[in-house]
Image (cartoon, grey):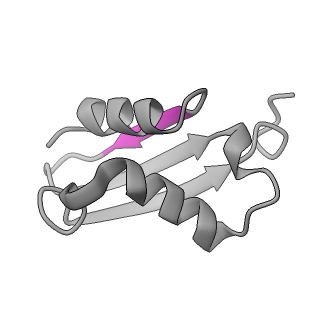
Amino acid sequence: MNPDTIKSLIEQGLPGAMADVRGDDGVHFEATVVSDAFDGKLPLARHRMVYATLGERMGGEIHALALKTLTPAEAGRN
């Protein structure tokens, strides 16, 4: 697994989202995801939305994923 693949999966699963994914070892990753879909949702719900885009890869090909989830307003992108 690589950061570009994870970025693509997240952005396909959350239309309109913008993801920045980093990770050097192929199993531990960090992602910042900005999406209008997060508006009004608590952090746990936001994280579940992102995990849903990755499906069974979580806990398998992707051992760990640290997430920062923001709305465009929270990210300063109005």
Q: Residue at 35% of width from left, 43% of height from top?
A: 22
Q: Can you say which quadrant of the picture contains the C terminus?
A: top right
- Asked if residue 77 is among those painted magenta in the image, a careful observer would answer no
Q: Is residue 75 left or right of residue 19?
A: right
* Depicted 3 relative to depicted 25: above or below: above
Q: Residue at 53% of width from left, 46% of height from top?
A: 32
| Residue in front for this viewpoint, 5 or 22 | 5
| Residues shaded magenta | 18-22
Image location of residue 31, percent across then percent down: 45, 48
Q: Residue at 42% of width from left, 39% of height from top?
A: 10
Q: Is residue 74 left or right of residue 19?
A: right
Callout count: 0
- Asked if residue 21 is among those painted magenta in the image, a careful observer would answer yes
Q: Can you say which quadrant of the picture contains the N terminus?
A: top left
Image location of residue 56, percent across then percent down: 20, 60
Image location of residue 11, percent across then percent down: 46, 32
Q: Quadrant of residue 21?
A: top left
Provide the major secondary structure of the magenta segment.
Answer: strand
Q: Is residue 3 left or right of residue 35?
A: left
Q: Is residue 55 left or right of residue 2?
A: right
Q: Quadrant of residue 76?
A: top right
Q: Residue at 30% of width from left, 40% of height from top?
A: 6
